[in-house]
Image (spheres, grey):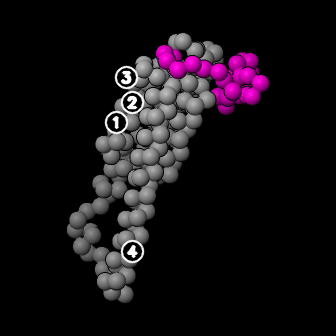
Amino acid sequence: MTVGLMRLEGKLDEDDKFVWTKGKAEDCPLPARVTEFLQQIVYPYLFKIFEVEDDKEVVERVLENLRELGEELGPAAFHGVIEKVMEYIVIFLQKKAYCQTLAMADEDDEDLEDVKEEDGPEDEEDSEEEEGDDTIDHDEIIFGNVTDLVLELARCYGNEFA
């Protein structure tokens, strides 16, 4: 929708791309309607997902979307919200995001001791490995997406990112 608004504003080139320069967001501003849409609709929704979503695949996609916004719109995509984006990046890197801590909060050591498989210990170990691999994969994907977002922010802001 954001790219559609940019098209309506006539801000895309013949390749359907917005030409932006790295540096300060103010140096390559977006049209007012696009900035308003991002700040009033897009970012509040994405930040809400970070706060309440327990599905790591959804969070992975939101992180990808943030990176894609930077690729498409440059530093102006993060105008007015960069501090909040950076706060979430730190939370994800510290593994303190809702989706990262929810699984740990729901588990109780006593509950885990009561679980026994009828088929024997081999099946129990296999299921633990499968569950662990799934969790590790999602955590690794989230870490990778956060890293990609940081790289994209550095590319957008250049020396201003520091």
The secondary element bearing badge 3 is classed as loop
Nearer the viewer's eye, disc 1 or disc 3?
Answer: 3
Which quadrant of the figure contains the N terminus?
top right
Q: Do tag 2 and tag 1 residues touch (Cβ < 8 Å)?
A: yes
Task: Identify the mark at residue 78; answer none if there is no mark.
Answer: none
Q: Neighbour class for label 1 at 10 Å: few (<14), some, many (≥20)?
A: some
Q: Earlier in the sequence, mark 4 or mark 1?
A: 1
Indicate the quadrant where residue 108 lies: bottom left
Residue holding disc 3 = 162
Is 22 placed left or right of 139 in the picture? right
Residue holding disc 2 = 86
Q: Neighbour class for label 3 at 10 Å: few (<14), some, many (≥20)?
A: few
Does residue 137 show up magenta in the picture? no
Q: Do tag 4 and tag 1 residues touch (Cβ < 8 Å)?
A: no
Identify the magenta region.
Answer: 1-25
The secondary element bearing badge 1 is classed as helix
| Type of amino acid at the residue the image marks with label 3 | Ala
